[in-house]
Image (cartoon, grey):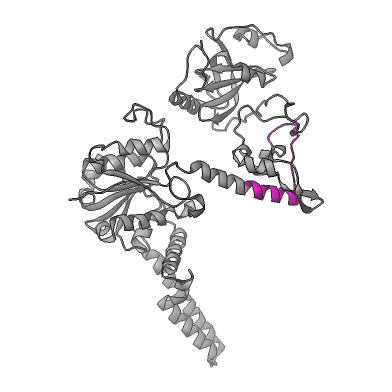
Amino acid sequence: MHTVEQVNNNNHDYDQVQFRSITNVQPQKLTGQIVHARRCYKRMFFIDLRINESFKCTILFRSDDSRENLPGELTDHELISHWKRVRRGDKVCVPVFEASEEEKSKRDYPVYQALDFVVLKAWPGNDPFPPEPAMGLKKSNSSSDTLPGEVMTAICIRSTVSTLSMSSTSSTQLKMVIEGDSIQSTELAPWEDYCKFWINSLKCIKKDCLKRHPTGTEYNRVQEIWVKEHSQARKERSKLLEDPHAISSKVPHSQRALIFCKWLVREFGKDFLNSGSGVLDIAGGKGEVSMFLTHMFGVRSTVVEPNERKDKPYKRKILMNAIKKQLDIEAGGDGHLYKRMDPLLLALNNQQSMNAQTKPQQEVDHATDAEIIKDEKRRHKKQQIEQFVVPRLTALLDESFLVNHKDVFEGASILIGMHPDQATEPIVDIALKHDKPFAVVPCCVFAHDNPHRRLSDGGRVNTTIEFVQYLMEKKPLGNRISKDYLPFDGINVVVFQKISH
């Protein structure tokens, strides 16, 4: 293994670099610039460190190394903390030790392992550092299915294609062959023969990549299959273990606000939700949930959002039309009836039709009438959009909110949050403290920002499932905190509490 003196004084190619063996318990320090970095998976990431113009190496950081006699080990939390500190272009000092034989055997260049690093000089200026390409793995000769001399991707890159349903795609392969621009139904190359970077973005970041880079009709077909497979794989990965809803039965993630509102009305009842000052929609963002509650279900709802949101009428118009369309569908219509049956617009259309059937005395009168009707339609639609609003409070849900907005909070029927990010736990804590009903759909866990969280068995809270369990354990006596699953794609578990007085 290189010592820092050897590395810094070496101006030769990799094959001329002299190695000196060191043990796992004798880490040496390397100093250089981070020129590439990638998180491979949850428990491992790597950086490429350029020591000088001719020498570059890879350094692994991992929390899943089970070897004995290591100089130390990383917890998952520490690994995440280190990854958040990685900045391409920074000059760093890294105490390194020997990587595993498995990792070394994959590469034709030096690879080490580390537990921490120190930033000696941060990358200056506002312009991002232009990263260098990853160095790649050894040429693969183990499989007759891969292209000879194929240049593998960077170490431990989690292949997007590998997340696909390989059991089906590898066995059936792609049912097509390209002859000019025609596609015939026969077997072609398996997924492994296609460059995943090219299929994903029509760009290849690898030098001398020997995988397939299709164009034209072939590219369109391969990418279409890739998107479908990737979408399905993503849905399967995000599905929680206890979720009773089949993936095929779920609606798109974009309809989560509507599904959540339907669940609230069914679970709590419209009368209860409308009691007092109504619903408090915490971290409500653009206010989609409150819009649906107010204008579709007739439930009063107030958005509590700390970020000032610029009002965009065209977005309100889109949401207004979506709600009207949904109301029409719920009533058994085709989703477009609201456009035809608006009373004022219907009257204006009738007037316009009558004018067209009546011979005008003067053409100028015809034009004037048409313009008047058009202006009236425009004014009516604008008025509808202006009325399509919900109350908003620009505030953070904390103790000061309870003082500054005492009447609103005390009169609230329930606290809700649809993917409220950092506000999830405060919603639950404040609701429990003040004996309020609540319903939250957690999303991001933010484990790094909340290292204090512990489950009843002492375990850390890192995943969504663990976060849900952590929230439910906040009030174990009486078992008053429950959970349910909503039928939409993505994180769809709702944690809630009912209060019976």
43 drawn magenta: no
> How many numbered callouts?
0
Residue 305 seen anywhere in this rendered image of the structure: no
As displayed, is residue 91 above or below residue 446? above
In this view, the residue in front, 211 or 168, is 168
As displayed, is residue 261 above or below residue 124? below
**Residue 159: x and y, percent?**
62, 35
**Residue 269: x and y, percent?**
28, 58
Magenta-tinted stretch? 202-226
In this view, the residue in front, 95 or 452, is 452
As displayed, is residue 361 above or below residue 31? below
Give the side of residue 101 with respect to residue 464, left or right.
right
Query: Which residue: 46% across, 71% down?
Result: 333
Quarter of the image with the N terminus is top right
**Residue 445: x and y, percent?**
41, 36
In this view, the residue in front, 397 or 52, is 397
Query: Which residue: 62% across, 31% down?
Result: 130
Give the side of residue 153 with respect to residue 26, left or right.
right
In this view, the residue in front, 177 or 284, is 177
* Quarter assignment of residue 132: top right
Outermost residue toward the left in this view: 501
Residue 347 seen anywhere in this rendered image of the structure: yes
Give the side of residue 177 with respect to residue 398, left or right.
right
* Quarter assignment of residue 191: top right
**Residue 179: x and y, percent?**
82, 50
Query: Which residue: 70% across, 33% down?
Result: 206
* Quarter assignment of residue 13: top right
222 drawn magenta: yes
